[in-house]
């Protein structure tokens, strides 16, 4: 079964395909990439949102391109010139700014979603529920009457 592409963009140097749980950055091997980066490094790099720590984004300036760079443990963040040489970044011009912002917001949201999955709060039991749980432990012989009485005083604030 082929995965559904949520969004994608193609620039002079790379193509970025965005999926539900990951994205794939493909560096293009062409004359433009050779001229700008001084090397051919074509190929795919897959980034799972669950592995990413952040995504860096810079708008294009008057004379510089913008870029989006994926960061994960062990990766090295770049700067605007790094967008041309980093295998973790895609450079773009003003004409692609709105689409890149849309992609950035989606990816950043997915990273946050994955990070928050591990931070879900555990529901607290009420003192009455806690007391019931300890009574069951007492009845089962797992704790002593003294331990139960001590916990009861603690839970009831006595």
Image (cartoon, rainbow, N blue to C red):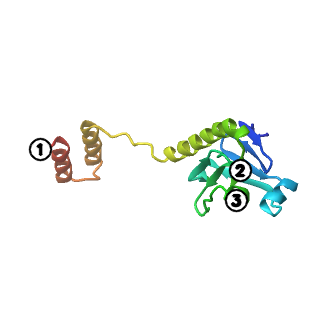
Q: Which residue is mark 3?
A: 86
Closer to viewer: mark 2 or mark 1: 2
Distance from Cα at disc 3 to Cα at disc 1 = 63 Å
Residue 30 appearing in the image: no
Q: Nearer the viewer, residue 37 or 21?
A: 37
Q: Position of residue 63 (x, y in %)?
A: 69, 49
On the image, numbered disc 2 is attached to which residue?
A: 90
What secondary structure is marked by label 1? Answer: loop
In the visual, does 29 lie left or right of 83?
right
- The answer to which quarter of the image holds residue 130 is top left
Tell me if I can see residue 62 in this picture: yes
- Residue 83 got which mark? none
| Nearer the observer, 155 or 15 | 15
Q: Position of residue 68 (x, y in %)?
A: 65, 49
User: Circle 3 — which element?
Assistant: loop
Mark 3: few/some/many CA within 10 Å (<14, 14-19, 20+): many
Sort mark 2 into few (<14), some (14-19) or many (20+) by Cα contacts within 10 Å: many
Instruction: Determine whether the residue tagged by mark 2 lies in a helix, strand or loop.
Output: strand
Mark 1, residue position: 158
Q: Quadrant of the C terminus?
A: top left
Looking at the image, residue 122 sits to the left or right of residue 65; the answer is: left
Q: For the N terminus, give its image quadrant.
A: top right
Q: Which one is earlier in the sequence, the residue at label 2 or at label 1?
A: 2
In the displayed structure, 71 sits above or below 95; it is: below
C-alpha gap between disc 2 and disc 1: 63 Å
């Amino acid at each position: 079964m082929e995965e559904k592409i949520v969004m994608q963009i193609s620039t002079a140097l790379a193509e970025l395909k965005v999926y539900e749980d990951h994205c794939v950055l493909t560096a293009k091997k062409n004359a433009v990439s050779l001229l700008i980066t001084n090397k051919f490094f074509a190929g795919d790099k897959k980034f799972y949102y669950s592995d990413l720590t952040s995504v860096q984004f810079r708008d294009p300036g008057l004379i510089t391109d913008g870029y989006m760079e994926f960061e994960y443990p062990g990766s090295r963040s770049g700067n605007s010139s790094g967008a041309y040489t980093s295998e973790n970044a895609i450079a773009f011009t003003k004409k692609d700014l709105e689409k890149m912002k849309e992609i950035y917001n989606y990816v950043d949201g997915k990273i946050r979603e994955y990070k928050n999955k591990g931070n879900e709060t555990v529901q607290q039991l009420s003192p009455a529920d806690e007391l019931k749980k300890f009574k069951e432990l007492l009845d089962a012989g797992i704790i002593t009457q003294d331990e139960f009485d001590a916990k009861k005083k603690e839970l009831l604030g006595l």
